[in-house]
Image (spheres, rainbow, N blue to C red):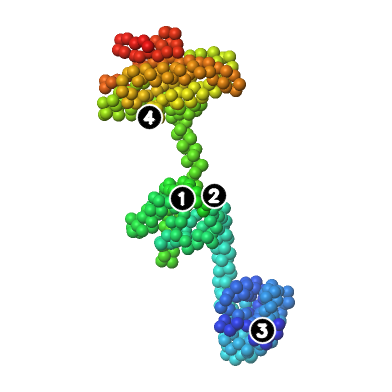
Amino acid sequence: MSAAEFSSSHEYGKYPVLIFGGGRGGSALLDMFIEDRLVHVIGIVDPSPDAPGIKLAKLHNIPTYQDGIAALQACRAFPDCILYNLSNDDSVAAQVTQVLGDKRVATGLEARLFWQMVTNLKQLKAEFERSQNHLQAIIRNVLDGIVTMNAAGEIHGFNPAAERIFGYALNEVLGKPISMLLLGNGDAGFQRYLTQPDASRTSARAVEVAALHKDGSEFSLEVSLSDMTLNGEHFFTAIVRDITERKLAEDKLAHLAHHDFLTGLPNRALFLDRLECALALARRDHSRLAVLFLDLDGFKKVNDTHGHEIGDLLLKGASGRLCAAVRVSDVVARMGGDEFTFVLNRIGDAHNAQILAEKIVAALAEPFVLAGVECRVGGSIGISLFDGGTEDAETLLRHADAAMYQAKKAGKNTWRMYQEGDVAES
């Protein structure tokens, strides 16, 4: 491209620049100016066609010159042209005076200082870009969701992990309110945080909120919030994590801590807790309750004859019949092995507890068919009654256990009622 063609095609409003020297300094300066929107390089001068600056200029269709006078002649078309001399040729200043009169040229130490500044800027730019690329790679690949929003709660950033967590693409949430992702108290908590005065606001760490997926499903979200000021504007960053699986695991562990793993019934600890609550209610309402202690008759024989697998199936089947025999308000628990306990709330009188004991014995008397094997068991039941006395949960359970052994001695498949100093027969 000729200087005239280049002159007619250049964008006006930019500063025209002519560079002398295509070595390391001139090449670095040209490289910076190529990317600068305010600079229009009209040419570069170097006697060597293999100089790096000459090669770079040719790649970008920038005029190149081996003769300084020819380049300065072309510069006449640009009255405001700025001249930089990064060559080692001291005659450039004389050539400029010869062609352009008193036009000044940046040369010598001044040009070298400028070149050093350009080099430092390029290094800083490269380091910044590397840092930015590293940061963006972390944000893109981090497992936690990162959501940024302004003081009004409008979403400004949404990383790929947040897209996976909520099911929305970035373009679907930009500029939208954060409330579209939250439910009830979760949204209210966000709004309170966003509207707090700066002085009283502190970072919120690992707060659990209810969130909403794009498909309409609800899930548990753990959120950590912090705020920052950028160019005088307040922004907030939320680090979010879907904790649905963790919550399920915690719930399962909590259930296992208080329930029998085989039958799903309350275990001894939970039974005693329920019994304590039932006693407090009975004392307040002046009502009666009964505690039953049941031991399966013949279970050991089934277990020894048919194996533990059939034994486990029998325990599950028996627990189902026991639950069906009592009211929803009553409690059935497995104490371990083949022992089960009951809390019968508001039974009225002792006769009602006896009727239920007979119902349980009758329910167990029906044969069980388990994996093609028919099994038969019975039940020996001890009953202790709370009638406004001073007995605690452990005492009532111990009395029912003692009455159960009396039922065993009486021939099994029956019940006995505990009385102070005596055990009443059925």
Whether residues under marks 2 and 3 lie with C-beta atoms below 8 angstroms apart, the answer is no
The first of marks 2 and 3 along the sequence is 3
Which element carries disc 1, helix, strand or loop? strand
Whether residues under marks 2 and 4 lie with C-beta atoms below 8 angstroms apart, the answer is no
In this view, the mark in front (2 or 1): 1
User: Residue at (44%, 64%) from the top-left corner?
Assistant: 230
Give the amino acid at mark 4.
Ser
Q: Is residue 138 visible?
A: no
Task: Residue 417: name its quadrant.
Answer: top left
In this view, the mark in front (2 or 4): 4
The spot of residue 280 in percent (x, y) is: 30, 28
Q: Establish if 398 lies above or below 75.
A: above
Give the amino acid at mark 1.
Ala
Which element carries disc 2, helix, strand or loop? loop
The first of marks 1 and 3 along the sequence is 3
Q: Is residue 367 left or right of residue 384?
A: right
Whether residues under marks 4 and 3 lie with C-beta atoms below 8 angstroms apart, the answer is no
In three-dimensional space, the C-alpha distance between marks 4 and 3, rounded to whole angstroms, equals 94 Å
Judging by the rendered image, the residue that carries numbered circle 4 is: 329
In three-dimensional space, the C-alpha distance between marks 2 and 4, rounded to whole angstroms, equals 46 Å
In three-dimensional space, the C-alpha distance between marks 2 and 1, rounded to whole angstroms, equals 17 Å
In this view, the mark in front (4 or 1): 4
Judging by the rendered image, the residue that carries numbered circle 2 is: 143
User: Residue at (49%, 44%) from the top-left corner?
Assistant: 244
Res. 211 mark:
1
Q: Is residue 126 left or right of residue 229?
A: right
